[in-house]
Image (cartoon, coloured by chain):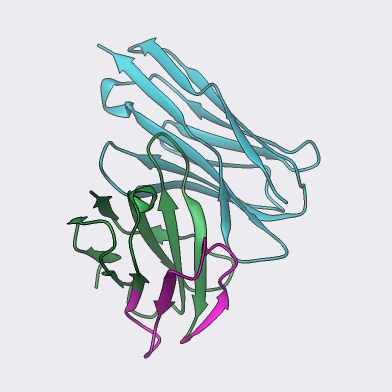
Amino acid sequence: GAGVSQTPSNKVTEKGKYVELRCDPISGHTALYWYRQSLGQGPEFLIYFQGTGAADDSGLPNDRFFAVRPEGSVSTLKIQRTERGDSAVYLCASSFGGGGGYTFGSGTRLTVV
Amino acid sequence: KQEVTQIPAALSVPEGENLVLNCSFTDSAIYNLQWFRQDPGKGLTSLLLIQSSQREQTSGRLNASLDKSSGRSTLYIAASQPGDSATYLCAVRDNAGNMLTFGGGTRLMVKP
């Protein structure tokens, strides 16, 4: 597609529920990144994929968070047993994986009530 | 661990002023630095990308400089307009990895 697409744009869920957030990167971009942005702060790195594999998942806060990219294109960020502290905007970005810049999606605003 | 700081955190100026946003980073071993704009409730729009071997990049009324050795970058906005009101984020990509480390952003308000 023309840009990075994230769905849903907004998600409200109850504490303890499971959620999935989807990212559709720019066609041909081999690298895909997930970031989390809390209100009034800059985005924080969660995980980076090169192709189908997670090249760096050091930013995932705990084992409730997991992400996949089975075919090297679309990625899903999965959060189990959601907590109120998980409320944030989850941003996805893609790049050619070399030295170029990143293109970000519009994000998914997750609210855990 | 790379740390990125942006000063000021917020800035309010009258329309027409030239202004400078500052970004500093602790580890000078960077691959590139990117400036983004973020409108309320929106994602990030890339403004300028400076590779580590470059000193500056320009796009329209925007100019970004990079002094890698001192760990600083500035974003210069000429003749500011109300439409420039947004949060401006600086992000650094290190040589060691592929992820970006972001500053906390500068919230800019340009008053008509």
Task: Name which residue lies at 31% across and 59% down.
Answer: A105
- Residue B96's x, y, as percent? 72, 65
- Residue A16's x, y, as percent? 29, 62
Check the rendered structure and report the hue given to chain A.
green
Q: Is residue B14 above or below residue B3?
A: above
User: Of all residues shown, which one is farthest toward the front?
Assistant: A16
The answer to whether residue A49 is visible is yes
On the rendered structure, is A78 left or right of B35?
left
Location of residue A55 by image quarter: bottom right
Task: Name which residue lies at 52% across and 58% down.
Answer: A45
Is A65 magenta? The answer is yes
Pick the residue in front: B77 or A42.
Answer: A42
Pick the residue in front: A66 or B111.
Answer: A66
Tell me which segment is drawn in magenta.
A52-76
User: Of all residues shown, which one is farthest toward the bottom?
Assistant: A71
> Which chain identifier belongs to the cyan chain?
B
Is A71 magenta? The answer is yes
Q: Is residue B11 above or below residue A62?
A: above
Indicate the quadrant containing the N terminus of chain A: top left, top right, bottom left or bottom right.
bottom left
- Residue A8's x, y, as percent? 19, 62
Q: Is residue A81 above or below residue B89?
A: below
On the rendered structure, is A15 left or right of A59?
left
Task: Name which residue lies at 51% across and 71% down.
Answer: A48
The count of marks equals 0
